[in-house]
Amino acid sequence: MANNSYRTVYAFAREMYPKNTKTDIQYGTAGFRSRAINLDHVMYRMGLLAVLRARYKKSVIGVMVTASHNPEPDNGVKLVDPHGEMLEQSWEPWATKFANVPDNKLEDTINELIKEFNITNMNNRVEIVVGKDTRPSSPHLAKSVMDGVLALSGKPVDYGIVTTPQLHYFVVCKNTKRAYGQPTEERILPKIDNRF
């Protein structure tokens, strides 16, 4: 990766999203869940990971900021793969590693992933679809995700407040060149209605 990209990645990590927690966090089926005050660095790093995943898959990837039914002080994040499915299980350890690695090891971890998956198109401006729930912490945390996307020269597309199924739908639509449907809130409703 170019030195300029690294400067941006680490300037954000060091100045705005340093890892201040000593407790490790684990990526699972529902992504990450924790107290919102502990998630700034995690969200930023999931923005980075989403860009790397999108370059590897040559597809749009989604990032949803939500903690579903958890109490209001909590929040979380999960990545959405190209066909609207959850993040491939083999990448969950990478998500965990990205979230927990010390700031001074973040560059090494990015390079390790790039080498492991032979990601060669590091200048490709991939699109990352971002959605969030209505929790008070969600706007700030979604911005952390988008800063991570921008730091690796990705293109964040902010869908604002949406449900998790809506975000999954938007990702599928974008990756099927709209053959599945239009990636808008208005176009998902007739699809749901027809199912019933």
Image (spheres, rainbow, N blue to C red):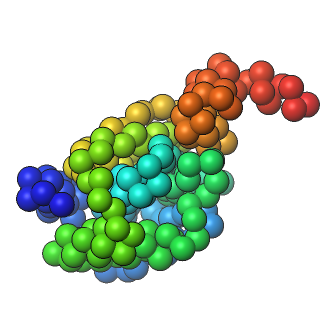
Q: Position of residue 35 (x, y in %)?
A: 45, 63
Q: Is residue 130 above or below residue 10?
A: above
Q: Quadrant of the C terminus?
A: top right
Residue 125 in view here: yes
On the picture, is 102 further left or further right than 3?
A: right
Please name the residue shown 77% across and 21% down the image: 190
Please name the residue shown 56% across and 31% down the image: 177
Q: Position of residue 53 (x, y in %)?
A: 42, 57
On the picture, is 23 further left or further right than 33?
A: left
Q: Position of residue 158 (x, y in %)?
A: 42, 33
Q: Quadrant of the N terminus?
A: bottom left
Viewer-closest of 33 and 105: 105
Q: How many marks?
A: 0
Q: Is residue 154 above or below residue 12?
A: above
Q: Which image quarter: residue 14?
A: bottom left
On the picture, is 187 further left or further right than 109?
A: right
Residue 72 in view here: no
Please name the residue shown 54% across and 34% down the image: 174
Most extreme residue toward the right is 196
Q: Position of residue 70 (x, y in %)?
A: 61, 58
Please name the residue shown 20% across and 70% down the image: 107
